Amino acid sequence: MKIRKVVTVIEEISQEGGRAVSPAARVAIVAAVIENPWAGQGFVEDLSAGIDATASDLGALLAPAVLAALGTPAEAYGKAAIVGLNGEVEHGSALIHTLKFGDHFRKAANATTLLPAVEKRATAGTIFDIPLKHITDATIRSHHQSVEVRIDDAPHADEIIVALAAASQGRPQQRLAALSTEQ
Amino acid sequence: MAATATKLSDWLRKIVLYQEDVKDEHGAPPAVPAVRATVAAVIRNPWLGTGPGEVLAGQAEAVAPHLARALSDRLKAALGGAEEIEAFGKAAIVGTAGEIEHGGALIHTPYFGNLFREFLEGESIICFADSRSDAGQALIVPMWHKHAPATRSHYQTIAARVSDGPRPDEIVVIAAASTGPRPHARIGDRKTDQVVTAEKLEHVFA
């Protein structure tokens, strides 16, 4: 795995809707900008070799880093793969839609649910939104949220951004009725 | 009249840290690795609804010191302390209901600049950028060496952006820092430059 850079973003929201949020709501993202493992190879039928060489290492790098950046236990989480223009969305999906990647985060966060994800192909500097859901019950409506990320010069055409996001809480002023009240 | 005591929480909506750790640049790891970061505070514009005749000093004294401390604390925490920081810069993005001058009042007066310099243990004048824009617009923040601003290896920039700020009635105040030079700095320095004049370069112009 060739990493060009690692980007960390931490949002601390202390006011929302004109009211204080206390303690501040925290959301952290850690993103690795890597060389697309399949760059320059044309259509690769079997992606497993690249997955085996990359996905677990990425998960092992990003999972502890995003939890350290968050600084508090994660209650919601999500992931992203943004593929540079020369690659396939399938390349990004290959790296993040495997237990080899996600299990690092689930284990580190004591989580059980599937990680919600965004995958797209885009130019450097693209804006992408990472969806987050509760780490043990994806039906918990208060924790449905997303966070926006932009890296000025990534992904290059032969790169992929792979990111994890974690939130310390649900939405800052969450006050919607639970799903169960509508059933 | 001295400003009365205030809390940053009276003004602050959110703080966003953005950090980049470059492992490889153009095919090779940096000889001198550096980590760069910005910290952006989104605050309500203290001068909202005032005109060009408004004196800005009072609120600058009340608000800017809090920003200098909050942003410096987070930069130091992210980058390993003031002793690790070699370059710095600052910026303001004013929402569309304000004046650029409002951003200037928060970053260009001693109430911010002197304190930011003190907290990061530098001596240089602090380079800057400012703009007035809608939420989500990026601003490129320049940085230079905190002790010796003419140190060419440390001329560098970082993009700062807050997805939902500034709203029209807000200002985003940004502090930036780097722990080292550009990834492959190799364009000499004032000490190594030849004396260059138009006359000496006649062979180039010829």
Image (cartoon, helix red, strand yellow):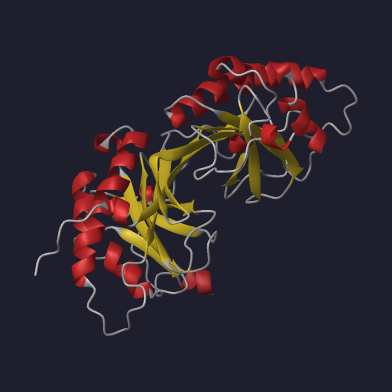
Q: Is residue A122 visible?
A: yes
Task: Identify the residue at horizontal 37%, vertical 71% (top origin).
Answer: B197
Q: Is residue B125 above or below residue B21?
A: below
Q: What is the x, y in percent for residue B125? A: 24, 59
Coordinates of residue B42 in the picture (x, y in percent): 41, 56
Total marks drawn?
Answer: 0
Measured from the top left, where is residue B27 in percent x and y? 60, 35
Q: Is residue A158 above or below residue B164?
A: above
> In the image, B175: left or right of B164?
left
Q: Nearer the viewer, residue B198 or B33?
A: B33
The reply, left or right, for residue A125 in relation to residue B146 is right
Q: Residue furthest left?
A: B1
Query: Residue drawn 25% across and 59% down?
Result: B63
Taking the image as drawn, is residue B193 in sight? Answer: no
Asked if residue B22 lies left or right of residue A164, the reply is left
Which residue occupies the foreground of this view, A126 or B172?
A: B172
Q: Nearer the viewer, residue B126 or B183?
A: B126
Q: Considering the image in quadrants, where does the N terminus of chain A appear?
A: top right
Residue B127 position in % (x across, y down):
32, 60
Quadrant position of residue A44: top right
Residue shown at 63%/28% (left/top)? A2
Residue at 51 percent across and 26 percent down: it is A74
Left or right, B79 with reference to A108: left
Quadrant of the snapshot with the C terminus of chain A? top right
Compare residues B6 and B79 and report the one nearer the observer: B6
